[in-house]
Image (cartoon, rainbow, N blue to C red):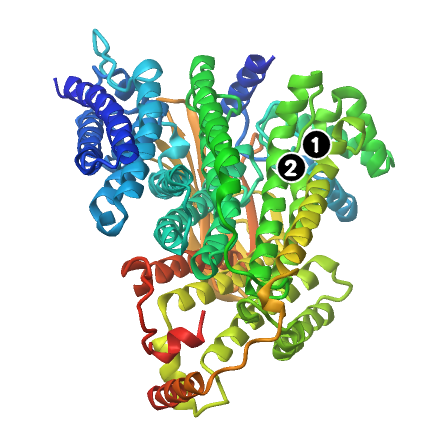
Amino acid sequence: MIAEIGHYALVLAFFVAIAQVVVPMYGAARRDAALMGFAAPAASAQFLCISIAFGALMRAYITSDFSVANVAQNSHSLKPLLYKISGVWGNHEGSMVFWVLILALFGFAVAAFGRQLPDTLKARVISIQGLIGLAFLGFILLTSNPFERLDPAPLDGRDLNPLLQDPGLAFHPPMLYIGYVGFSLAFSFAMAALIEGRVDPAWARWVRPWTLAAWTFLTAGITLGSWWAYYELGWGGWWFWDPVENASFMPWLAGTALLHSAIVVEKRDALKAWTILLAIITFSLSLMGTFLVRSGILTSVHAFAVDPERGLFILGILIVAVGGSLTLFAIRAPALKAGGLFVPVSREGGLVLNNLILSVATVTVFIGTLYPLFLDAMTGDKVSVGAPFFNATFVPVMIPLLVLLAIGPLLPWKRGNLRAAVEKLWVSALFTVVVAGGILVLEEGAPLAPVLGFGFAAWVAGGVVTELAERIRLFRIPLGDSIRRLFNLPGAAYGMSLAHIGMAVFICGATGEMNWTRELVATARAGDTLTLGQYELVLEKVERSQGPNYFRDMATLKVSKDGVPYATLHPERRLYPVQQMPTTEAAIRSSISGDLYVAIGEGSDQGGYIVRVWVKPLVPWIWTGAMLMVLGGLFSLSDRRLRIGAPKRSKRPAARPAVTEAGD
Amino acid sequence: MIRSIIMALLVAVLTAPAFAVEPGEMLKDPALEARARELSKEIRCLVCQNQSIDDSNAGLAKDLRVILRERLVAGDSDSEIKTFLVERYGDFVLLKPPVKAETLFLWYGPFAIGVLGAIGVAVFLLRRRDGSAVNEAPVPLTDDERKRIDVLLSEQDRKA
């Protein structure tokens, strides 16, 4: 019964969406306040309906209602509660319901918090948001009904893919989806602005917090996924340039560009058409990610649906969305008046270059990801495009961005002086030389990669500190005043510094892991000692026991570092009998200098177990760097200026606190 | 074809030992083994999704690792081994596709788009500048404005 209510709620949501699309759009065209006023309640009703459907599905999972086919196929009565809940989005149908739930949530957020939005803009944004929802609700109802019943109901379910039964993965999809789908609002705002024919700083000020929120969640989601791959897949990799990873990375790159170009629209009323285009591209890449992952074109733990019908449906949505939005853009964009003027060497110029580089990076990933599909379709030739390709192409593309990252924020708006900016960076340059030189000396005959990696990290970090020092006028006014300035900086200033320093920290982690990882693979019996670098590991025992829905072999290793007891590690090997699938649970001991990573394999024929040990320097810096970016996003979101709404030109410019003027 | 790859993948996952490189496979000579590892990272496990034979635990990956080491011991160079594998499995086996007619766009497409983008940006930036008011000398401040700035600046110094 509850499942039928959920199904009914989805159908209702579909019809609410039709009304949500048509009525406000027509109202905005007619300037009819009553019809436009329909938008907000429609968005709320839409959110309510989908929440009911989602709740019904969740209940079926929690109560293990195996008469619902979706639950029977993806859950099991013995599964821990957390994974029953996360199982809701751990499958195709459920994840699509989750997708539209987030979509409706963002529509609802505009309805609830968008009181200060101009009526027509608000009505149109909600209408476009409804249109996206309509397409995906149609997709769910026609091809992926999560509430299908089974008669007779099976006694127990087929369980969730054991790889997905993991705390990191329980939260990875929600984060990622909020990010992916959050860009839908930037898209809706862009479409609405094109229909209105007006883009102004007020528009950018509305779009920016939503884009920022989406970007922040997407960053967190990608990081969680990467972290999961690192500890769960059992070979210590954290980024594989897998097509599904790239599918989330492309919107991230484009979204990062969008964040930066929206600043220019907001502050300087320039780059308007480009920003609109970026908003379209970013969301289109999110849609394409959904298509790639859901169509079954790629096979991986993400591809739940290997069903051409579904793939074609999403492809249809993708073509209509991209084609429609680009057509609208082509018709309307020339009418957008170019705004603020600036010379090439200026903050605006720097941000234009940032956008250029990020766009080229996106294109690199895009071509690399789709080329095998494209070539196969055109000529039938099969090629592989894997990590070595991306390392050889993507990394060099990003290097100019790192150089620019230190300089750009030091340039003033409108017209800057490159020499003045570069002169400010002499401390940073010195720091870079010391770090790079230090690596060169410490690592005799070091390959170039770590020297460059840490050198660029130092340059970026130095640039961030320099910019902050400039902002608080360090050493040029009394120290106390500088500190007071530091505490009074707007949230966006902290946000930028944190996100940029996060980039430096991330580069350190990635460079350390990629260049200095050491590995030991050996067959060990109980009592054997393994040595890797400073570490000595004694395999004490391997015991077999039973978990809630799996069997496991758990090893106990006593580790000493430089002869001093350091840790006791328990790597596991699990077998999930329902899906007949073995998984590895690595044991990881993290410290600021790096990870000690141990995994065990099956017992070998000659007795003993295969043990793999890695020393992975600076790996925690990868997650720390990414988390600093997330923190930067949150700080920036907390900025008062984003909440007080669009700036209105007052008759007499009033004196504002000095800090906000001096900064940004 | 795809279906058979998926089946092979499933079978591989279910039956294979959980590890990629196993102790038994490794070469005695550490330098040669290091070369083998580096080379393995560029060879695709053909039945897997985007895994190198160095990462994969599939049976086929193991076979390829063993073949690769045999060739190394026989004295082949890295490129000879790659040629050997490409002759048997096609370009599909290389994770970094070779530069040739079919892959020109893959390798140089991003670069070409970058150059086009850079030209576009340059034109845009220069056009912005030409005939713009920014480039002209700023209009001198009136006395009234100067007074207001002084007031604002002294206010700022007091607050800061």
The circle on residue A358 is: none
Question: Farthest residue in the top direction?
Answer: A151
On what subunit does the disc labeled 2 rest?
B
Viewer-nearest residue: A34 or A297 = A34
Residue A80 in the image: state x and y as whole percent.
Answer: 25, 35
Q: Residue at x 34, y 51 (%)?
A: A206
Q: Is residue A158 visible?
A: no
The circle on residue B65 is: 1
Viewer-nearest residue: B159 or A431 = B159
The first of marks 2 and 1 along the sequence is 2
B11 over A544 or under it: above or below? above
A145 over A332 or under it: above or below? above
**Is A114 placed left or right of A165 in the picture?**
left
Image quadrant occupied by the N terminus of chain A? top left
Which element is circle 2 on? Answer: loop
User: Which residue in the structure is indicated by mark 2?
Assistant: B54
Which element is circle 1 on? Answer: helix
On what subunit does the disc labeled 1 rest?
B
* Residue type for callout 2: Asp
- Local packing at callout 2 (Cα closer than 10 Å; few below 14, some 14-19, many 20+) is many
Residue A116 in the image: state x and y as whole percent.
Answer: 24, 52
Q: Are marks 2 and 1 in contact (CB under 8 Å)?
A: yes
Residue B105 in the image: state x and y as whole percent.
Answer: 73, 33
Q: Residue at x 57, y 28 (%)?
A: B49
Residue A393 occupies quadrant: top right
Question: Farthest residue in the bottom direction?
Answer: A478
Residue A467 in the image: state x and y as whole percent.
Answer: 52, 74
* Residue type for callout 1: Arg
Viewer-nearest residue: A317 or A73 = A317
